[in-house]
Amino acid sequence: MDGLGQRVVVERLLDLDRLAGLDELVYVRRHGTVKDIVGVVQVRTLVIPAAGLGTRFLPVTKAVPKELMPVGDTPAIQLVIDEALAAGIEHVVVVSSATKPSLQRYFEADPALVESLRAKGADGVADRLESIGRDWRVTVVHQDRPLGLGHAVGCAREAVGGEGFVVSLPDEIMGGSALLRQMIDVCVDTSGSVVGLMEIPRDEVSAYGVIDPIGEVDGRGVVAVRDLVEKPPVEAAPSSMIVIGRYVLTPDVFDEIALLTPGAGGELQLTDALRAQASRSPFHGVIAAVDRWDTGTPDGFLAAAVEHAVRADVTGSLGSRLRSAIERAAG
């Protein structure tokens, strides 16, 4: 497939004993299809699709990738990474674009800046900068064209290797790692892919991907999945459980992606690859029991940023200041 062949991967290899990172430029070429045999699954890698242009946030995203915009005082992509690290992830693969060099720059060590901060007594900020990527490995893969989520995930194939992996959409921020930890456990236990789920009012399902469940949701919030249906009419929806932006996938999904036929707009849809998996392999969903913020729109991003800032405010004064500001704006 076009776009899944030659590409540039910039990988920072970081030592666990806090040695300086080593920047490498690695040229990766695909050498045909390797059949991944799904047996005992290990999940140690996170894939973050981040090549989008952030058009809803223009003009700011001309200069600053949306993934680096702060939710509270932390870039959105770092919150997604922190969630995954707490769930046991060791390797982060960012599918970016050559038009977003600052996203790659975020993960690069900057000893001069750290030294300057320490000289000014700003050790807290310096420690925070040094912690980025220190105890986990980062690989940045360039997606040459925006051809859908399936294409973006496919671009991470060589970086992921033959293990299971997580896909986290950076437009969705979770209130903890519990959902992801449970999804990884289900994937390992069943040797099958797993999607995060949320129940919504039935009259809203036509805007989302919906699962066709097999049986009932168990006491852990886990349900077997027969199929996935993209944006069904309300009357035809097989359930009111929608797929959210967390996936734990077995490596054979890459073979399914390689077989996809482009749909509308020439895009390769990840849902189509997941449907193929569900038709022949164990496939489950886990209902989210953690807070979730959708930051894909300016309004949603603002709401998430405000709530995170209030939660992190140790003095408790920010909440009252915000209430006063809202009352003034309301007139």
Image: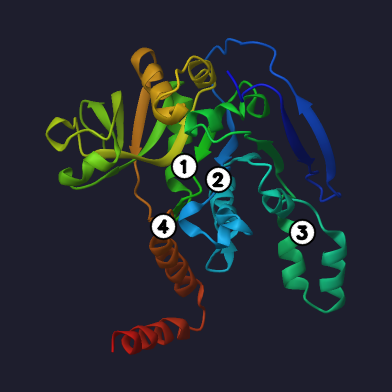
Where residue 180 is drawn, which disc sits there?
Answer: 1
* Three-letter code, disc 1: Leu
Label 4 SS: loop
Q: Quadrant of residue 299 in the image?
A: bottom left
Task: Say which label, 2 or 3, has the lower sequence index.
Answer: 2
Could you tell me residue 33's position as x and y percent? 61, 11
Q: Looking at the picture, tell me which residue is in the foreground, 38 or 98.
A: 98
- Marks 3 and 4, how far apart in space? 31 Å
- Marks 2 and 1, how far apart in space? 7 Å
Label 3 SS: helix
Q: Looking at the picture, tell me which residue is in the foreground, 307 or 40.
A: 307
Task: Describe residue 200's horizontal placement relative to residue 313 as left or right.
Answer: left
* Three-letter code, disc 4: Thr
Q: Does 309 appear above or below 262?
A: below
- Marks 2 and 3, how far apart in space? 19 Å
Marks 2 and 1 in Cβ contact (< 8 Å): yes
* Three-letter code, disc 3: Glu
Where residue 130 is drawn, which disc sits there?
Answer: 3
Q: Which residue is mark 2?
A: 84
Residue drawn where x is 85% and y is 43% of the image: 22
Between circles 4 and 2, the one closer to the viewer is 4
Label 2 SS: helix
Q: Which residue is mark 4?
A: 297
- Marks 4 and 2, how far apart in space? 23 Å
* Three-letter code, disc 2: Ala
Task: Say which label, 3 or 4, has the lower sequence index.
Answer: 3
